[in-house]
Amino acid sequence: MTQTTTTASTVGSHTVGSMIAKLCESGLGLGTAMAADIDAAIFAAQPTGKDGRTINTNHPAFNYGHLAIYPTRVLEMCGLDPASAAAPAGYEDMFKAGVECRNDPNRTIYPSKDEIMAAFTKGYTALIQQMPKVSDERLAVINPREGRFRDMCPTIGHAAMFLATSHIMMHLGQVSTWRRCFGMKSVM
């Protein structure tokens, strides 16, 4: 039996984008699974400690809403049309880095679980579909963002890899901890 091996040289000039897309599938899959059994009534609630005080932590509504704004950023950096990944109006201001996650047990601040999860799924599905189109040459271009983000991710490829993989998993780790605070079991 002959085994066929595909190498980077036989895949073409879009190898890294395909790798990013494949790895991003894991984040989308885990994120979807982790949200599936969370009751919409507590999706935007912060847990309460044994002392009765609210624990200041990011709840699922904030984490998934925050993640939903990043696929368009990755696609823009990569020179692709971000329209298919766009989150609803207002998400940027509500969920961007540095914005405080607010406890919303009465569900009056944040969009519904269904809306947030639809935005999360739409964004990462579009990213997964489009990343294989990005050439390795494009991913080797210097990251246009300056400062700490460029220091951490010197090229567009580094930035795309981080935002499509590590960033998702970091925030899903927060969701995992939140789940345990509410007595939910592990999804993995």
Image: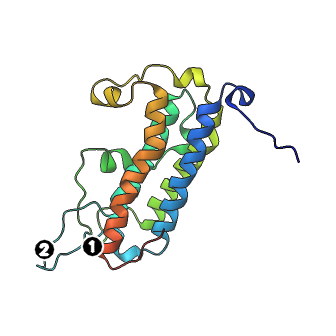
Q: Can residue 179 be seen in this view?
A: yes
**Above or below — where is 16 with respect to 50?**
above
Residue type for callout 2: Arg
Q: Residue 53, percent across and down?
A: 12, 74
10 Å neighbourhood of mark 2: few (<14), some, or many (≥20)? few
Which of the two discs, 1 and 2, sits closer to the camera? Answer: 2
Secondary element at tag 2: loop
Q: Residue 7, percent across and down?
A: 71, 32
Secondary element at tag 1: loop
Residue in the foreground of this view, choosing between 188 and 38: 188
| Quadrant of res 93 | top left
Q: Residue 185, percent across and down?
A: 41, 77
Q: Can residue 89 be seen in this view?
A: no
**Above or below — where is 82 with respect to 107?**
above
Earlier-in-chain disc, 1 versus 2? 2
10 Å neighbourhood of mark 1: few (<14), some, or many (≥20)? some
Residue in the foreground of this view, choosing between 131 and 119: 131
Q: Residue 164, percent across and down?
A: 48, 43
Q: Name the residue under label 2.
A: 53
Q: Real-space Cα distance between discs 1 and 2? A: 14 Å
Which residue is at the far front? 1
Report the disc number at residue 15.
none
Q: Residue at x 61, y 29 (%)?
A: 134
**Above or below — where is 68 with respect to 55?**
above
Q: Name the residue under label 1.
A: 105
Residue in the foreground of this view, choosing between 93 and 122: 122
**Above or below — where is 95 with respect to 33?**
above
Q: Which residue is drawn at 48% across and 60% down?
A: 31
